[in-house]
Image (cartoon, coloured by chain):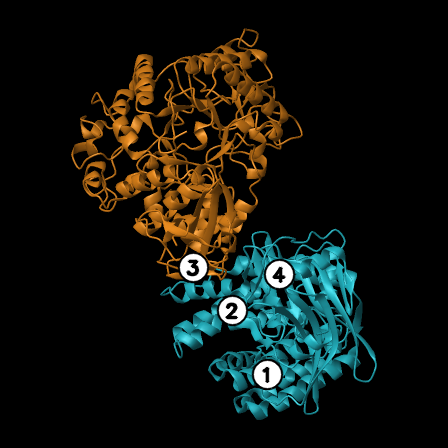
Chain colours: A cyan, B orange
Amino acid sequence: MTPENRLESAVALLPGWLPHQRWFAGKDRPVDDLRVLAATSLGADDPAIWHLLVEVSQGSNTDLYQVPLSVHPHPDGRLEHVLLGRIETGYVYDALHDKAAMADVLERFARQDAVGSLRFITEPGASLPLGEASLVLTGEQSNTSLAYGDVALLKVFRRIQPGLNPDVEIHDALTRAGCTNIAPLLGWLEGRWEDRHGGRQEASLAMLQSFLTTATDGWSLASASVRDLFAEGDLHADEVGGDFAGEAARLGEATAQVHSRLAQVLPVGTMNPDHLTDLAEAMRARLKAAVVTVPELTQHAPALESAFDELAELDADVPTQRIHGDFHLGQVLRTVVGWKLVDFEGEPEKTLAERTALDSPIRDVAGMLRSFDYAAWHLLVADHPGDDQITYRASEWADRNRSAFCDGYARAAGRDPRDDAVLLRAYETDKAVYEAVYEARNRPAWLPIPLAAAERLAGAAR
Amino acid sequence: MTLEHPIPAPGTDPQWFKRAVFYEVLVRSFKDSNGDGVGDLRGLIDKLDYLAWLGVDCLWLPPFYPSPLRDGGYDVSDFKGVLPEFGTLEDFTMFVRRAHDQGMRVVVDFVMNHTSDQHPWFQASRMDPDGPYGDFYVWADDDTGYPDARIIFVDTETSNWTFDPVRRQYFWHRFFSHQPDLNFENPAVREAIMDALRFWLDLGIDGFRLDAVPYLYEAEGTNCENLPETHGFLKSIRKMVDDEYPDTVLLCEANQWPADVVEYFGDYSVGGDECHMAFHFPVMPRIFMAVRRESRYPISEIMAQTPQIPANCQWGIFLRNHDELTLEMVTDEERDYMWAEYAKDPRMKANIGIRRRLSPLLENDTNQIELFTALLLSLPGSPVLYYGDEIGMGDNIWLGDRDGVRTPMQWTPDRNAGFSTSDPGRLTLPVVMDAVHGYQVKNVEAQLQNSSSLLHWTQRMIQIRKANPAFSLGDFTDLGGSNPSVISYVRVFGDDIVLCVNNLSRFPQPVELDLRRFEGMQPVELLGGVRFPPIGELPYLLTLAPHGFYWFRLGEALS
């Protein structure tokens, strides 16, 4: 039996397996066609390892997925939970869970290997976690991440978009610039294939970066602080033990430092008044659509729209640059050496062009300010609905930490984001509108959070 | 080397201090043997049984020298005597011998930066500038020298220079104006200090806690702290004790950041050639900060910033001592917060710190006292207990300066807390009598009779620490974990692996730990011996009670 035959029988297992994976986008639609666009053998036997790029057609929609498989001649009990099925030559598993297969991948990074459609690239001077056992981390949605010991993290993109992934691009630029507020990039995997029209395509498939040991995400830390506040009868946010303002200010500083470094090493530009008018128009359109989905927004709509009117009338050139793009407390990690920003992929639903577009860093600031609001309110809507006293205290916590974040940002950036009031309010309003639609569709219990923000932002209108 | 008995006979283990549990005992306040209202050396001898039972390996005695006592004895007026209230040199010699008989060592405070202004050296120096002591102190015609040196006792002093009307010159002092700094540029001063050190070593003591060492030398254009000449002199002391008195430990008090303090260990490549031990000052305020913040980062950060120390050296760590809880090693913002939280009455503040004992600082909360003690006994370094904290003694903020935390030890519910048979009005300091911490409630006798007391618990924890050398000698690795309110770390010494998990929050907390490196091993809880589920590949889940903690030894899993 030739390797190609073996591969064919393994591929035959995919239609029954792919749709059940968490990262598979079209779970609700039938798979019409499935074809392998690239297959690279990374090992002939025990286990045989195949790296596949698989195109899945569902109606008019096609998506490209990265699927590494390993084939063991005998069943391996430790991989039973990722078994695709049995073929003549053995048992087919998801190779990302296979320690032997993933050790092989690491060695290819060390050799800077180029094999079949794959190219393993490392950063100059990167020290690789050779010999460390891999473990797939739980809780990921659209990618699969695995840790090599507690030394390195391999993030494997599952749904592939052609082009350089912004997460790789930004980490590469910031690592080379010596930025200390990120997890340094160690290397990445590039893939090439021909699409069904014969066009040559290229994309980032995975990135390897330092693992931030002892880290906690900002959301958990902020939640601990809010929980502490709510447990007190009558103390103010600045009086309780779990006060977060110091952390919020340091987070603001770290954010400003990353922004300033990004502006140094990657392209910058400006938005002129015409661009701002277009931006305001897009925001208005989103508000209009949102009112249909979330009727509760109607009463605030005119006031919210005034934020966009002001933006349209802003007679200024606004500096733009690469930004984080999906910035919130879940995207920052507190380590023993300060705050680190992670995950520069941008919002996953957007196209690559949208995710790499230049934008004002105020947009990231607005994202984080909204996140402080969420941190303050999510325990409230879950545990204390309708409690006026706690509602007041949640607002106080959010105000205190939002302003501490801006203070810290201003200290490091030399310019206070609150001085760009029109821009900040427009971005924050746009974000709150987006959140209202999202919560109405996905988490109605949390809808009061963006609605309260809408009310507050509307109240701030002149 | 049997680790259950970590203090072998003198002369057989030069690194005994790395495994020792230290206990700071104030002679004045521990036990009065002759009913004059002041604790003394014979009283201390009577209580050595108790200290040995508790598990103390080494006693640290703050100054017991003749002194006008304007700074708790740190103003020494004779380096080679015993304060008459405390006893005689013969009493001291007997105390050292009896302590050794009980397996305990003795470290004494030695103040070499300055003397009392009553010291004969200073009196001679001010009277006769050209005499043999004329150059023993740092004199100047004006008060403009060394302007970059900070003032340490900001509550009482306005300058580091004070005018002496006798000599009609200014003298230099880093602490109180009645404590002139010795002039270490003068070889005769260095020789006189060496001579005094040898005097005590000849009486059999096991080491010195060297007070205020960063300030020995001065130089223009510097802040007059940590100067190379200061290190040079400490190295010469080390060489003297190594050559003439092996087994002696030098414990340096340098209230500085760990990165600066490591300089006092000396040359890393030879395992350290200056002080054997140094206090790790920032750990303590950060434990308080972490518990208030319910966040592990104040502790994790300072541990991450703590450099490796030479192989033959050890940190000394403490929760409280005879000084105030110093807040120089936290940020300004955190200091304001600590003051607001832990020093609600202005009388609780002293200089840049808080003058309270452990139990009142923690509002007599047993869970927190136990958590703090568990941290003290498991973080890297040799723990230094402060007398009375093992029974949760209180303080008296109405007493002046730092006397509030130096009240008599509470032995019994009887008159004067069993400390002294004197007339209560004659006591050196009044015993604590409040309803929460008073001696009727908190005393050794009652806690010895109650097996669930803090005293018995502390004794048991010390035993466990001694049975597991990883606590004293092991590497330290912060494990992080899923929950920022929980600090978890492993200490590893050979095949002795100890896992410590501490809940800094006042609420119950879950935590998931990545213990893959110990896959297949089984945690055994050290207080009760309960075997927990074996460690697998997936995150290890533990749940902790409010301010709860676990100590586990990791051993081979039973099949």
> How far is mark 4 from mark 1, CA to CA?
25 Å
> How far is mark 1 from mark 3, CA to CA?
54 Å
Q: What residue is rendered at 46% in x and 39% in y?
A: B351
Asked if disc 1 and disc 2 are in contact, CB closer than 8 Å, the reply is: no
Chain letter belonging to callout 3: A
Badge 1 marks a residue whose secondary structure is helix
- Label whose residue precedes the other's in the sequence (4 or 2): 4
Q: Does residue B268 appear left or right of residue A414 in this picture?
A: left
Total numbered badges shown on the rendered structure = 4
Q: Which one is in front, A232 or A25?
A: A25
Residue farthest to the left, as pictured = B414
Q: Which residue is mark 2?
A: A398
For the N terminus of chain A, the quadrant is bottom right
**Mark 3 is on which residue type?**
Val
- Label whose residue precedes the other's in the sequence (4 or 1): 1
> How far is mark 4 from mark 2, CA to CA?
48 Å
Q: Is residue A313 above or below residue A209?
A: below
Q: Which residue is mark 4?
A: A100
Q: Which one is closest to the eye, mark 4 or mark 3? A: 4
Q: Which one is closest to the eye, mark 1 or mark 2? A: 1
**Mark 2 is on which residue type?**
Ala
Residue A344 in view, yes or no: no
